[in-house]
Image: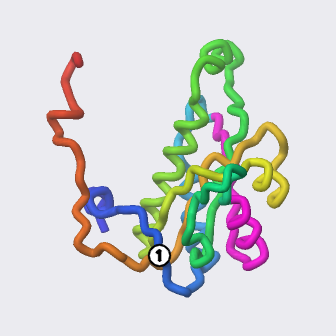
Amino acid sequence: MDFMTIMQTRKSIRAYEDKPVSREDLIKIVEVGRLTPSACNSQPWKFIIVDEPEAKAKLCDGLVCTDGLTGCPWRDQVPAFIILVEQEANVKPAVLTHYHDSQRFAQGDIGAACMNMCHMAMELGLSTCILGMNDQKKMEEHFGIPEGNEARLVLAVGYGIDLNPNFVKQRKSFEEVVSFNQW
């Protein structure tokens, strides 16, 4: 599948077949995340693959926020997850630290890595959904994430069941979102 087709057809999937995702495919997906460019080559991430039943149960517990809202009501059917942990960006040379402190490079880098991983999953015939709501304390406890690091995103991965096959991707027109040389 060519890249433009992936971009035109990729969508978040919230229903999955009861079929495991191979470790080989999960490793390919994470490898694409690892290879994603990052600001100042800081690579501010760690990826945790979650595919065993006990670990998945812990992750599902961590997707329920402390305010009682659920980040993923269909989480029990997902065969695998990838936690994208944001680490402090290690910016070199040190002269750039002044500029880095006022920016959020790491968050953009994590987002870029996550989308690249979604595209790789699609190339492998897998579906994904990006989850941005979780209980940080539970994630830290369940997965040994050190303080100062944040489970920024969780990527659900599996063989999707398309509950809306007639879905048409709706986007603003090109003219609404693109201009040349000024607003």
Within 10 Å of disc 1 (Cα), the crowding (few <14, some 14-19, many 20+) is many
Residue 136 vs 57, above or below: the answer is above
Nearer to the camera, 92 or 135: 135
Instruction: From the image, tell me which residue sits under label 1.
Output: 15
Nearer to the camera, 117 or 9: 9
Q: Position of residue 105 (x, y in %)?
A: 57, 30
Please give the range of residues in magenta: 42-62
Q: Secondary structure at mark 1?
A: loop
Residue with the most extreme bottom position:
18
Q: Quadrant of the N terminus?
A: bottom left
Residue at 76% from the left image edge and 55% from the top image edge = 139
> Residue 181's image quarter?
top left
Q: Is residue 55 magenta?
A: yes
Residue at 68% from the left image edge and 67% from the top image edge = 60
Q: Is residue 122 magenta?
A: no
Q: Exactly how many numbered labels are in the figure?
A: 1
Residue 12 vs 33, above or below: the answer is below
Q: Position of residue 160 (x, y in %)?
A: 44, 76
Residue at 79% from the left image edge and 49% from the top image edge = 137
Q: Amino acid at mark 1?
A: Ala
Residue with the most extreme front position:
68
Residue at 56% from the left image edge and 31% from the top image edge = 39
> Residue 104's image quarter?
top right
Answer yes or no: is residue 67 visible: yes
Q: Quadrant of the C terminus?
A: top left
